[in-house]
Image (cartoon, helix red, strand yellow):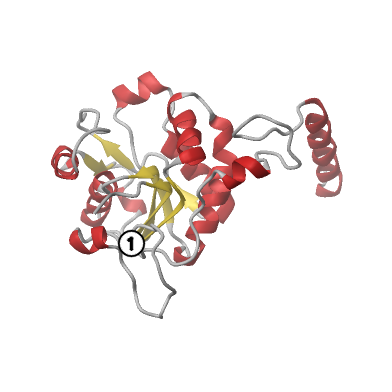
């Protein structure tokens, strides 16, 4: 028997109310009770560096001054032109944001994904293109096996739910394993990732002549996103934009 929406929605609301009574929402940062599910308490909100105001059009890092109607790029993006059109980030990679992302990446904190997707959707709103295909930065299968999930894929799925855009979790394939790059220089990152990522041959038809929105958890040098963007260009994507949960503020 198929239930009507008039019956299903009240049942869903009742179920969610029951769950919230049994498992009341807690702050993602410190764990105290909060008013909204997947939220932050006021103290942790203050310690979380959300990005707003004037930003670099290519990577989303905050900049001084007010918008003047002209495209504005940071020094790093001017020195290293990006193979994508627009980029945004929800947070700076520091303080509470760094703790949340490390928890998601290495501590199985998948409860971060829901609010993170909301923050990313808000940051990406100015650059969203109608009909764009959302795709996550891929992990090599050996790293995926060890970690059990790709945090970028979780964020991409959450962002798709927030925006209503289609997403393809396996659009990109990392066919060559690279060493851990946390301590590598920008030059070493770009060299290590050159030709390491390709569009999955069975998915290439989905991006020919279409806009793609690439998703990752953190942008440092931009080497990984650059490798992904170049692979999409080679497969015939019409336009490429990127959005990350956080942007590392590099020293110039």
Residue at screen point 37% across, 39% down: 170
Q: Quadrant of residue 75?
A: bottom left
Q: Which residue is mark 1?
A: 58
Residue at screen point 27% across, 47% down: 228
Q: Position of residue 205 (x, y in %)?
A: 32, 52
Is residue 5 visible in this depiction of the protein?
A: yes
Q: Position of residue 101 (x, y in %)?
A: 46, 36
Q: Quadrant of residue 140?
A: top left
Near mark 1 (Cα within 10 A), the count class, few <14, some 14-19 or many ≥20, is many
* Above-or-below relation of 116 to 130: above
Q: Secondary structure at mark 1?
A: loop
Q: How many marks?
A: 1
* Above-or-below relation of 185 to 68: above
Q: Position of residue 134 (x, y in %)?
A: 43, 51
The C terminus: image quadrant: bottom left
Camera-side residue of 169 and 6: 169
Classify residue 38 as left or right of residue 134: right
Camera-side residue of 51 and 235: 51
- Which residue occupies the extreme bottom position in the image? 69
Residue at screen point 85% across, 49% down: 6
The N terminus: image quadrant: top right
Residue at screen point 54% across, 30% down: 110
């Amino acid at each position: 028997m198929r239930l009507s929406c008039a019956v299903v929605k009240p049942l869903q609301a009742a179920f969610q109310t029951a769950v919230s009574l049994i498992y009341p929402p807690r702050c993602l940062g410190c764990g105290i009770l909060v008013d909204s599910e997947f939220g932050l308490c006021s103290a942790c909100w203050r310690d979380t560096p959300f990005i707003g105001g004037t930003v670099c059009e290519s990577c989303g890092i905050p900049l001084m001054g007010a918008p003047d109607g002209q495209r504005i790029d940071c020094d790093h993006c001017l020195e290293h032109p990006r193979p994508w059109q627009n980029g945004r980030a929800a947070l700076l990679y520091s303080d509470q944001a760094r703790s949340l992302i490390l928890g998601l990446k290495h501590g199985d904190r998948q409860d971060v994904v829901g609010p993170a997707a909301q923050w990313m959707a808000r940051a990406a709103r100015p650059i969203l293109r109608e009909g764009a295909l959302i795709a996550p930065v891929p992990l090599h299968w050996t790293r995926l096996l060890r970690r059990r999930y790709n945090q970028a894929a979780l964020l991409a799925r959450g962002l798709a739910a927030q925006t209503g855009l289609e997403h393809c979790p396996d659009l990109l394939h990392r066919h060559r394993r690279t060493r851990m790059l946390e301590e590598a220089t920008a030059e070493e990152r770009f060299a290590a990732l050159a030709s390491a990522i390709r569009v999955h041959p069975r998915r290439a038809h989905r991006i020919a002549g279409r806009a793609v929105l690439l998703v990752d958890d953190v942008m440092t040098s931009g080497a990984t996103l650059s490798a992904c963007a170049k692979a999409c260009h080679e497969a015939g994507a019409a336009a490429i934009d990127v959005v990350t949960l956080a942007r590392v503020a590099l020293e110039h």
